[in-house]
Amino acid sequence: MTDHGSATERAIRWWTGLDRGWQAMCVSFVLVAAIVGIDLPIPW
Amino acid sequence: MASTLWAGGRRVLPGIAVLVLVGLLARVVTAVVPIGSHLLVAIGIGAFVANVFGVPDWATPGVDTHGLWLEAGIVLLGATVAAGRVIGAGGRVLAIVLGAVIATVLLVEALSRWVIGIDEKAGSLLAAGSGICGVSAVAAVAGAIDPDRRQVAYATATVLLFDAVTLVAYPAVGRLLGLSDVTFGVWAGSTMFSTGPVTAAGLAYSPAAGEWAVLVKLARNALIGVVAVGYAMYYAGGATHRPHREPHDDGAHDDAHESRSAVRVRIRQLREGVPVFLLGFLLLIALSTIGMFTPAQRTAIGNTSSWLFLVAFAGLGMRMNVREFREAGIAPVVVVLLALVVVSSGTLAVAMAIL
């Protein structure tokens, strides 16, 4: 991987650089956005 | 590019698939045989698989992601918490949390130093682990007081042992005493140790008890920064018996420099002590309270949280290693057991009286 890699490489570097609390925040907000944005029904 | 993404995914996906399978198995088992909460069964199946068959190397990176799913599940749980109910009981609950934390830390310190005779730093690690947030508190305070590895291993093993025991014991005692959801959640959240087992025990009791347990536990976790800084200052103060310096040397300059960097380190410890996902949890409570979500969306978010917990708890079980418990040693177990019995029963009595 180079310093000026592709968007995917930069995104992976950004993600792996986050600590677990921030990763958890990202995962949760993506899920909330999906549920609210496209009315994604999640059954239990 | 795509190969990097694929390599990263290939590393964690097999283990995550194992977690999902263990979680689904727990749901199937509890649907067929009503032996209790599917969350506790997921932990039990995970622990059984890991201790009987072991976790294969190809699954380890994915299984180790269980903390991420737990924290994401907690953030999403925020959407189902009723803020009005929390604010109504807030003052009394906060008093219980502070009382339980202070009593546990002081009692474990006192028992370690003057009754059982455990090494000072090992006692402090045990006090933080049992008073604040389990293994993560042991790690945070270890970073502040620089103990040896053996002391950290002792404290961690002791905390893990009590995590496993209280996970089963608390819901059983709660049902035996017929505790209300609020009382059980506040009791578990303020006296059990690590966040995962507290969440599992609370949700195993009832969804409302789970919300209270998480809320109280997060309030307690937020104190770790203060406790870590307190310990850092205490041990730094005790270790300042420096050799005598001649008047012409530049010790004053060194001391000023050291104290400035010590202050910077303590501020950083305070900031890092507050778990980030706590902010996400609070944000979702706020969004939910101002009516950002429809009832159907709130249900979907709550269900997502339940799925994340199921996966997380399968991983929690798969990381319970019975062999590690043997590292605990008798003395730390006796100290923590005595403190837990005293503080836990005292907290329960207060919670039953005022909630």
Image: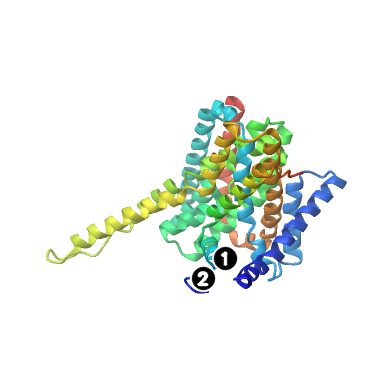
> Percent position (x, y) of residue B224?
47, 47
Q: The N terminus of chain B is located in which quarter?
A: bottom right
Q: Neighbour class for label 2 at 10 Å: few (<14), some, many (≥20)? A: few
Q: Are marks 2 and 1 on the same chain?
A: yes
Determine if residue B41 is in view. Answer: yes
Q: Where is mark 1, residue-wise?
A: A8
Give how far across and how far down residue A4 sits, in percent.
48, 70
- Disc 2 is placed on an element classified as loop
Chain of the residue where label 1 is placed in the rendered structure: A
Q: Which residue is mark 2?
A: A5
B28 lies left or right of B97: right
| Subunit bearing disc 2 | A
- Residues packed near mark 1 inside 10 Å, few (<14), some (14 to 19) or many (20 plus): few
Nearer-the-camera pick, A21 or B236? A21
Q: Which mark is residue B274?
A: none
Task: Using the image, determine if residue B223 lies above or below residue B86.
Answer: below
| Colouring scheme applied when the structure was drawn | rainbow
Q: Is residue B127 visible?
A: no
Q: Position of residue B323 (x, y in %)?
A: 66, 64
Residue at (49, 51) in percent of width and height: B112
